[in-house]
Each structure stands twice: as C-alpha cells, then as structure tokens.
Amino acid sequence: MKVTSLPADDANPGWFHTSAQRTPRPCATGEIRTRWAIVGAGLTGLSAARRLAERFPDDEVVLVEAQVVGFGPSGRNAGFAIDLPHDIGADDYIGDIDVARTVLKLNMVGQQSLKDIVAAHGIDCHLRASGKYQAAIEDRGVAVLDAYRRGLDKLGQPYEMIGGPDLPGHIGTGYYRQALYTPGTALVQPAALVKGLADTLPANVSLYENTPITGVEYGDKVVLTHAKGRFVADKLLLTNNAFAMHFGFLRGRMLPIFTYGSLTRPLTPTEQARLGGKDFWGLIPADPCGTTLRRTHDNRILVRNSFSFNADGRPDPDCLRRFKQRHRRSFKRRFPMLPDVPFEFTWGGSLAMSANHEGQFGQLAPNVYGALCCNGLGVTRGTATGLLLADWLAGERGEVIDFLLASPGPSRNPPRPLLDIGVNLTLAWSQHKAGQES
C-alpha cells in the first residue's frame, strides 16, 4: 500500500532554531534488513529505540524519521513534562481514583526516564523541576481550579493556591485572578531534548533522517519503501501518531489537531526588570482552549493557543497567519509592560487526539506494534509508552503495562466531511467560550 500523506511541518519552529545545531544522520539508501524497525523519531520512537537496544543488545534497531529530529511535533510542544493525571471528563479532573493512581505512575515512568537520561548524558535541554501554574481569570476558570484542588486532595498530591495579588511575584503579570501551583511538573526545551536523545542513542541503534516512508507491505516480513531503497524488518513499531492512519491502522479513529505557538526575542535586562517574577516558569490555562505561557531559560516569552483540525496531518499556512495575530492580542493583554517586544518565531505543531481520550498500545497486526495517540501529553506519556512497549516486547508485564493493554483504544470518528465540520465547529466554539482565558 502507498503512504498517502507525509509530514511537512512549517519552517519556523522557535524551539528548533534556538536550540543547538546538530548534524542530521544520513538518509537511508539501498536495502537494509533488520529485526526491529521503528517509524517516527519523536519522543515515543526515541524512547522505544533506546529501550529495545538495551533489551536486545545483540540486535540492530533501525529508527526512521521522515524529517530531521526535533523539527516535528516532539520539538514543537510547550515543553511541559507533567506528572499529574488530568481527566477533563471528570467533575474533579481526577475521576476514578485507582485509574488516576495508575496514570500518575505511568506519567512518572516517562518523566523519570527523561531525567535519568538527561543527567547520564549531560543533555543541555534546560530540564528543570520547576512545577507549573494553572491559572484562571473568569469565574468559570476559578471553578475549574477549585474542582481540581478537590481532586488533588483525593489523590493526596501537593499543591498551592495563589491569589491574584500574589501572582506578579511569581509570573510577573497581574492578569490572572488565581492560580493552582503543583510542584511535580518539569519544564524543558523540547527540541533540545529530542536532539540530545537522538545523539546519545545506544550504538546498536541506526537512525536514518530525511527518509519518509512512501509504501509498506505487511506479511512474514514488513517491507518499508522510500525514495532510495527499502527496509525489510521482522518487526515494525509505529510511533508516528496520527500518521499511523496512513499506514493502514486506526483509520478514522485519531484526530490530527494542530496548536500554535509564538516565541519572542530575548527580553533585554530592562524588560526583564519591568516584567519581574521568577526567571523560569510555565503556566497552563484553566480552560483547555486558553493560553499557555512560558518564560524560558533565555528570557523569551512563549504564547501558545488556538487550534485547527487538519485531517491529513499537515499544517495550514492560513491558520499560521491568523493565529499569530491572536498570539499578539493575548500577549498584549498579559504583558502591557512589554509593548515593544516582537515575536521572533511562530509555528504550528500537531497533537494526536481521540474522541474518547484513549491511546493505542500493543499489537496492531502480525509483526506490527504501536504506541500512538498521546492526547496532548506527549512529553511524559510518549516517553513512557515507547519505553513500556519495548519492555512488553521483551516479555515484561506489570500494573502499568497491563493498564495500557486493557485500553479499548481510540474510538471511531464520524465519517468525513461530517467529521471536519463537527471538529472545526467544536474547536471554534470552545475557543470562543474560553473568553479572557484565550
């Protein structure tokens, strides 16, 4: 079968361009035979490749990336390695306590793995256990924080409620009425992280970049064709999120949702003094369709909001232009003390979402396996599921692996074009309802 849609992300991702340059690995040529092939060198694929190489030290593991490492979605997110569960369908955002405790363990597997690798290899990605602020402006947002606080009490997790008058001492801006601070989140420069992970892979991992797969044949062997040759693998792992639908799996079950970010130039010392607050922090909105903010290690401000549904998994340039203007409005409302600070970068990045908020883990077909659809939690969840998929293939079981295997997986979406109309209307209405949180 032909792979009908290939990654083609926009050219200006701020995290990628402000992280250290690296020399990409060469693209593949000729026929390459291997026991293990992994498609997608984002956080999930890098984690799976590292763990497979450790579990099977006598095997070569082939990791294939359509673009260059760090340029795709894993280098375009907001860089929050979140530990806590957050079930937006539950009244207290925690839901079933036993499920929440298992999800917490799952997230901690991913977060701890990243901390260990970064420390062991000295990866310069500005990973800090700085916690996160979840902030609200309107009554509806404050009610969300109160509900989440009750859920955290039930789960026995620490937090601090911070009133509006005290928030400028934390984040500089006085825009918000209240924030809930949780200490367990780590913040990271995401493109620097994935570049570092790629450059510290075990010796028995062969990484090929700029090698988009254009065709696939399933059977006793899996054959992956590309412009300059092919891979012939005993086992295939798909860690390419929504693009797995173009490989014949989970068709009509994942939603490629794009969200958009802008990054300012570095603030001058005068501007930093005018802003005040801590020199490194991250904030997520009480409303899921509100604005995420970060102050970075190099004193830039990240503004991230706005969503679009792009069914083919590829960006829409018109959305990028429109949403940059929305970022500017959001920035001006929050940082009136910084009127002359321009954005240096604006970009979009995709999330693989499902209507029932479930991911896919385990076997997809004979000799084909997947860890897919992280529902917006790719830093921790992607890392954890890639690692645990390799553990499972090596014969390991346990509470968290069994929990992942028991998932029903992503639910089926309505047919197109009803899907396109419904999702885009829902996104537009949700962003409108976010009000001042946007």
Image (tube, rainbow, N blue to C red):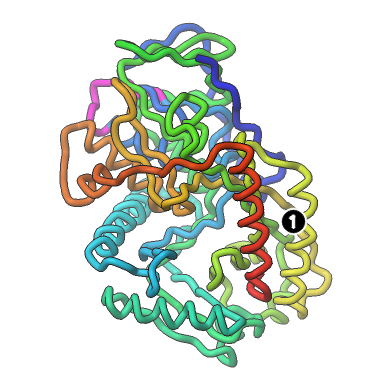
Which residue is the extreme one toward the bottom? Answer: 165
Residue 257 lies in the magenta-colored region: no
* Magenta highlight range: 54-62
Q: Is residue 170 above or below residue 1?
A: below
Residue 57 lies in the magenta-colored region: yes
Kindly identify the residue that appears in the image at 64 percent across and 41 percent down: 310
Kindly identify the residue that appears in the image at 72 percent across and 68 percent down: 267
Which residue is the extreme one toward the right? Answer: 340
Q: Is residue 424 left or right of residue 220?
A: right
- Decide if residue 12 is in sight here: yes
For label 1, the SS is helix
Q: Is residue 278 above or below residue 323?
A: below
- Say which of 300 and 40 sits in front: 40
The part of the image, by quadrant, that contains residue 84 is bottom left
Which residue position is annotated with label 1?
323
In which quadrant is the C terminus drawn?
Answer: bottom right
Q: Is residue 272 left or right of residue 91?
A: right
Q: Position of residue 172 (x, y in %)?
A: 63, 81
User: Disc 1 residue type?
Assistant: Phe
Q: Is residue 182 left or right of residue 296?
A: left
Mark 1 crowd level (few <14, some 14–19, many ≥20, 10 Å Cα): many
Q: Is residue 73 left or right of residue 121?
A: right
Q: Position of residue 54 (x, y in %)?
A: 26, 33
The part of the image, by quadrant, that contains residue 296 is bottom right
Count of labels in the image:
1
